[in-house]
Amino acid sequence: YSTGSGVSGSSALIQDFYSREVTNPVHLIVDTRFQDIEGSIRAYVSTILSLGDRQLAAQFHEIPLDLRMIEAERVGFDLLKKTIVDKLPNDLEGLEATMERLLALIEDVFKYVDDVVHGQIAPDNNVGRYLMDTMAAIPKMSSDSFDKLFNDSIQDLLLVIYLAGLTKTQLTLAEKLNTAAQIL
């Protein structure tokens, strides 16, 4: 099997490898991006195109696929189909989204506590104990110490982002130099 939206050059290599192990292997392609929701899993068999004794290429033919899943697999598969995203957030966007969710949760807790204090809702001892245990687990530190710790973490995150970009640039440059050297 392979992932992607269709047959690629690597599919021929995979098919060639498995054709030495079994006769007439079936090549599955799983579209993990779910671009075509109905056809996210496809099955192919290949035919060898040759000229005389020389093998030139492999031609893939799609075959019918009967996709059967147990209920738990179907639920997971359907959930994956619904959560299509255009792009994954980068580290800073992920941090921002996490902080926004955290603030929303804190606001919910404040509202609950205020409602209990003002007698608008009945107190729940289990929730009170849970909040007490949660507050006891938070380390005691001054706001200056927290700011320094948070800023240090942000600096570390920015450094990792910079180094990842630098590594990506270096790999791209090495690939171009390697391609240029092969031409010569």
Image (tube, grey):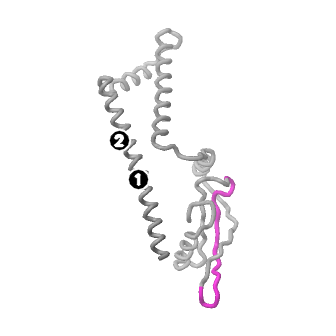
Secondary structure beneath label 2: helix
**For residue 73, above or below residue 108:** below
Mark 2, residues whose alpha carbon is within 10 Å: few (<14), some, or many (≥20)?
Answer: few
Residue 135 place in picture, x, y as percent: 36, 24
The residue at the point 30 percent across, 23 percent down is: 142
Q: Which of 24 and 177 is in front in this view?
A: 177
As shown in the figure, which amino acid type bears the numbered disc 1? Leu
Residues under labels 2 and 1: Cα distance?
15 Å
The residue at the point 47 percent across, 75 percent down is: 182
Residue 15 place in picture, x, y as percent: 57, 73
Q: Does residue 39 appear anywhere in the picture?
A: yes
Q: Which of 33 and 166 is in front in this view?
A: 166
Query: Residue furthest toward the top?
Result: 118
Q: Nearer the viewer, mark 2 or mark 1?
A: 1
Residue 172 place in picture, x, y as percent: 46, 60
The residue at the point 65 percent across, 78 percent down is: 47
Magenta-colored segment: predominant secondary structure? strand
Q: Nearer the viewer, residue 170 or 30?
A: 170
**For residue 11, above or below residue 36:** below
As shown in the figure, which amino acid type bears the numbered disc 2? Asp
Residue 139, by quadrant, is top left
Residue pointed to by mark 1: 166
Residue 107 place in picture, x, y as percent: 49, 22
Secondary structure beneath label 1: helix
**Is 47 one of the magenta-colored residues?**
yes
Circle nearer the N terminus (2, 1): 2
Residue pointed to by mark 2: 156
Bounds of the magenta segment: 37-54
**Is 32 one of the magenta-colored residues?**
no
